[in-house]
Structure formats: structure tokens, C-alpha cells
Image (tube, rainbow, N blue to C red):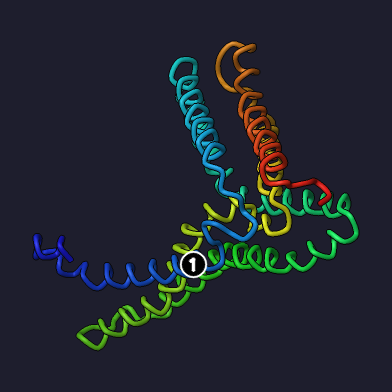
Amino acid sequence: MLLVLLLPFLWWLTVPLLVGYQLARTARRMARRVFPVRPEGHVEDPEVLLVQRVRAWAALVMSGALLAVFGGWKDVADAQQQFLQRLLFAPWLALLSAAVVVALLFWAARPGTRRAMRTQLWPAGRSALWYFGAWTLVPLWFTAAGKGMGLLSGNSNGPPGLLLWVLVMFVCWAPFWWVIFFLCFASGPALRHAFNLSALHAALPALVTTVLVWVFAFLGLLAGGLPPGPVPLAVCAFLGGPVSVTAVAWWEINRLRRRYGVRWRG
């Protein structure tokens, strides 16, 4: 609104901005309801969060330094392609990794603990269904919106034609952008907390993250090979990411055991 007041020739942006704001607001409210920032069973450890942030920034700096020193334009393009592939496949691989880890932990748990875990399995599964249902709706809504806009007659002129065009555009594209906003707000908490699996076991998010980072490492190796640079340095860079994530996750699980009494089978 302030932008429109300062620049009156942008008055036509008022309605799209208001509609987009309301869509984003309702999508964020639903995303926080399905994937809360602090889900049930999650243990907030400031030291672990600090180490995770430092590790993430260090990995980003090291990757950028390797590309800047040893990489070429092809390596930059490959890095961008791998980033987009991870962004696309991360939710599905996270779900598969979570299912495997939950099955192993469920098998290792005591009979009494299994009954308690079973009661928390449906809420976590419902959250995953919300997330992957939204991902499935994206191409469906995009195709439906394109088909709906294609039904408009090209010779509809005048105010009635303009009003019809606006209404059809809103009906076609508003659900699509709502789903996009929902995924933007839900992806961080969903992947960080492994679809609210901390309610089953406090160590599950760390275990799922460890499995997922190794899967991505080997998929990146198969797709693009080692990082640019001398072979010893490239091998260290390849192993550094998953090994450091595994070390931090193992340290986090040990802190859960020592400070909060979390047991593998308890």
C-alpha cells in the first residue's frame, strides 16, 4: 500500500498485492498448524542449534571457495542443477528415509514402547500426507489453471469481459498460489523436524537427517562426480558434508541421552 501511495501509477498492483497477502497469510497459518516450529517431543538445545548453523555456513563457504578457486562455468551450472534437483527430490527422499528409520527404530523398541509409538504414528503420517498432497497438487492446479484460462474467449471486450477475465483468473490461480505459499512456509519445519516425528522418538529428526545427507551425497557423486579441485581435496570435500552432519547428529543424540534420558529402545 505504501508503494502505491508513493508511486500512484502502480495503482493496478493494489488488488494483486492484497490478494497475495491474504493468500500468504492463510497459507502460513495452516503451515504453522500442521508443522509447528516446536512440535511435540522436540527438545530445543541452543548449543546444538548453534553448532548446526556454524556447520551449515562453513559448508556453504567451503563449497563457494572450491567453485571460485577450482571450478569453471560448467561446474557452476552443475552446482545449480544439483541444487534444483535436491530442492525437488528432498521431500520425497526425506519421506523414504523417515519411513526406513522409523521402521528400524520401531523394530528395535520394546513392546510397551511400540504401543506408545503407534499412537503417535498417525499424527506424523497425517502431517506427511498434508505436505506431499500439496506437492502433488502443484502440477495439477497449474495444468487446471492453464486449461481454465484457455477457455476464455479472446474477443470478450469491455467492462463485462474484463470482469469475467479477472474472476476466472482469480478462481484458476488463487488455489495454485495458496499451495505454493503453503509449501514455502511448511518446507523448513517439515524437513527440519522430519514431519513431526520427534513425537515418536526425540532422536528421529537427527537420524533422518543423517540418512538423507548420505543419500544426497552419493546421488550427487553419481550425477556430477567429485567436487572440482585436486583429488585429495575433492574427496575431503565430498566426505566433509555428510561426515560433519553425522558427527553433529551423533553428538545431538548423545546430549539427548545424557541430559534428557532419551534411550534408543525407551
Side of 217 relative to 47 (left or right): right
**How far across and down, in percent of the image, does residue 175 sit?**
46, 73
In this view, the residue farthest toward the bottom is: 160
Task: Give the position of the N terminus as an image quadrant.
Answer: bottom left
**For this rendering, which residue is in front, 218 or 74?**
218
Vertically, is 176 above or below 72?
below
**How far across and down, in percent of the image, does residue 91 sit?**
62, 52
Vertically, is 196 above or below 241?
below
Side of 152 relative to 237 (left or right): left
Q: Which residue type does callout 1 highlight?
A: Val
Name the residue tied to disc 1: 179
**How far across and down, in percent of the image, does residue 174 sit?**
41, 73
Residue at the location (53% across, 30% down)?
Answer: 55
Residue at the location (67% across, 68% down)?
Answer: 126
Residue at the location (80% across, 64% down)?
Answer: 116
Vertically, is 181 above or below 72?
below
Examine the image and state in which quarter residue 9 appears. Answer: bottom left
* Residue 58 visible to an observer of this rendering: yes
